[in-house]
Image: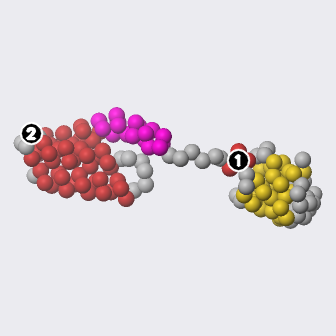
Amino acid sequence: MTWWLWLLVGLALLGIEMLTPGGFFTIFFGVAAIVVGALARFGLAGPAWMQWIWFSGLSIASLLFLRKPLLDWMRRREVKRPEVDSLVGETAVILEPVPGNGVGKAELRGTSWSARSTDGSALPVGARCRVDRVDGLTLWIKAD
C-alpha cells in the first residue's frame, strides 16, 4: 500500500474516533496507520504484507497497553459531582405547605425542590424535615 493511503486511512480512523462517544478504540488503529504511513514514506515499512503486520502489531499493542491508562487519565480530569442520593438524611425547610398526599416546596442546599410527605402528614411552612429519599427532582421528607 502506498504511504499516503495509510495516512488517509489513519486520519479517517481518527475522525471516526472523534465522532463516536468515548471508548478509545479507533484512535489506536488510526495512529498505527499513520505510523505505518510514515515508515512506508521513508522506505522502512517493507512490502505490503509487512506493512499489514506492522499495522496489526502496533494497533493491538497500543490498544492493550495504552487504552487503560488513557481512560484512567480522562476519568481523573472529570468534574466530580455529588450524588443526588447523598441528600438522604439531610435537613430541608418547607417553603410552601406540603399537603398530606400532595406536593409542596422545600429548600435544601439553597435550592428549591418539589417535596412530598413520606408518611402522608401535612407539613407547614418553616418546618424542618429530614429527607428520606430522592425521586427525580422530588424530595420525600418527614417531619423532624
Residue under pointer 2: 44
Residue 123 appears in the picture as rendered: yes
Identify whether 43 is placed above or below 139: above
48 sits left or right of 102 in the view: left
Asked if the magenta segment contains residue 64, the reply would be: yes
Residue 67 x %, y %: 37, 40
> Between disc 1 and disc 2, whose residue precedes?
2
Colour scheme: secondary structure
Q: Residue at x 33, y 57 (%)?
A: 16
28 sits left or right of 121 in the view: left
Q: CA distance from mark 1 to mark 2?
A: 57 Å
Residue 95 x %, y %: 83, 61
Disc sitting over residue 85 in the figure: 1
In which quadrant of the rendered view does residue 53 lie?
top left
Residue 1 appears in the picture as rendered: no
Q: Which residues are magenta?
A: 61-77
Label 1: few (<14), some (14–19) or many (≥20) C-alpha neighbours in 10 Å: few
Asked if the magenta segment contains residue 103, the reply would be: no
Q: Residue at x 53, y 47 (%)?
A: 79
Disc 1 marks which amino acid?
A: Asp
Residue 8 x %, y %: 19, 56
Mark 2, secondary structure of its residue: loop
Disc 2 marks which amino acid?
A: Leu
Residue 139 x %, y %: 77, 55
